[in-house]
Image (cartoon, rainbow, N blue to C red):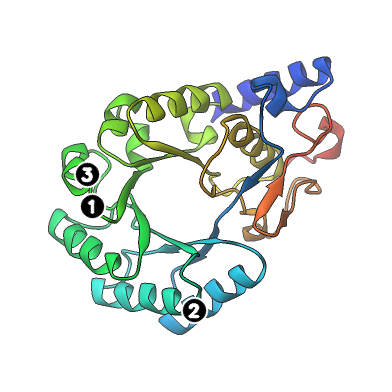
Amino acid sequence: AARHALSLALGDRMARREGCPFSISLASDARNSVPVNATVGDADPHTTADRAAAAVESGIRCVKLKVGVRSLGADVARVRAAREAVSPDVALRADANAAWDRQTARDALSAFADHDVAYVEQPLAADDLRGHADLRGGSVGIALDESLASAPISDAAAAADVLVLKPMALGGPDRVREAAETARAAGATPVVTTTIDAVVARLGALHVAASLGELPPCGLATADLLATDLGSDPAPVTEGRIRVPDAPGIGVAPGEVSTP
């Protein structure tokens, strides 16, 4: 986290000196907006369906559910309710946070395939790369998140279809860009997310995502999960995307944020 803070601060300063957005200082062909997913969390089927429908009504085209806290049967019912609440062209994702053993994960993937789930994030323990590799290749993809904290990116990329890259957890924007390159070389897709961060780190993640070219929806729409923030947000979600601020740097000046 400390390395991330320093890396982001230096990147913001360099971009300000160059007079360009941080994303452009990272890649001259950076995108000007990034698609995002909505996280509807863990709730009963009715509430899950309502949350998914509300997200789609706002313009979101990808919804992520938290699974693994309840029984597999209960989670399947929640996934079914979410799918029935949204149109077939809306992507569904599930995040198990390493809750399952291998057999439960296989059963979950089989059941989720009936509801067109795009991928399941971290179905097994972080250190079980072999287990994840054995699960990949089906109609429901395998994404790795927690595994990236302890395994080499190249090893994780070889065991997954998607790598969930968090600048705050990996040590900075530069490391995310390197990890994304490694992922793509191995045939895995990078997705950038936050760790439920305040506006400074959230904007940094947005710029990094924009610098990586075309990406699937990213987990950057997390501002509304905070009770308070360190400053105003210049990059709200609009019609399922977040537009990258075109001001120099990340989009907020040091004097515009407060100290916790």
Q: Quadrant of residue 95?
A: bottom left
Residue 113 is situated, as x and y percent measured from the top left of the image, at 28, 64
Mark 3 vs 1, N-terminal side: 3
**Kind of element beneath mark 1:** loop
**Kind of element beneath mark 2:** helix
Image point (77%, 28%), residue name = 21
Query: What residue would you read off at disc 1?
Result: 138
**Kind of element beneath mark 3:** helix
Q: Badge 2, how many Cα within 10 Å: few under 14, some, many 20+?
A: some
Question: Which sits in the foreground, 78 or 60?
Answer: 60
Query: What residue would you read off at disc 3?
Result: 132
- Which of the two marks, 3 or 1, is nearer to us in this view? 1
Left/right placement of residue 104 relative to residue 17 reads left
Q: Quadrant of the C terminus?
A: top right
Q: Quadrant of residue 159?
A: top left
Q: Residue type at mark 2?
A: Ala
Query: What residue would you read off at disc 2?
Result: 85
Mark 2 vs 1, N-terminal side: 2
The answer for how far apart the CA atoms under marks 2 and 1 are is 24 Å
Image point (61%, 74%), residue name = 54
Residue 100 is situated, as x and y percent measured from the top left of the image, at 22, 57
Q: Quadrant of the N terminus?
A: top right
Image point (23%, 46%), residue name = 136
Q: Is residue 44 visible?
A: no
Label at residue 247:
none
Residue located farthest toward the bottom when viewing the structure as drawn: 46
Residue 33, relative to residue 140: is it above or below? above
- Which of the two marks, 2 or 3, is nearer to us in this view? 2
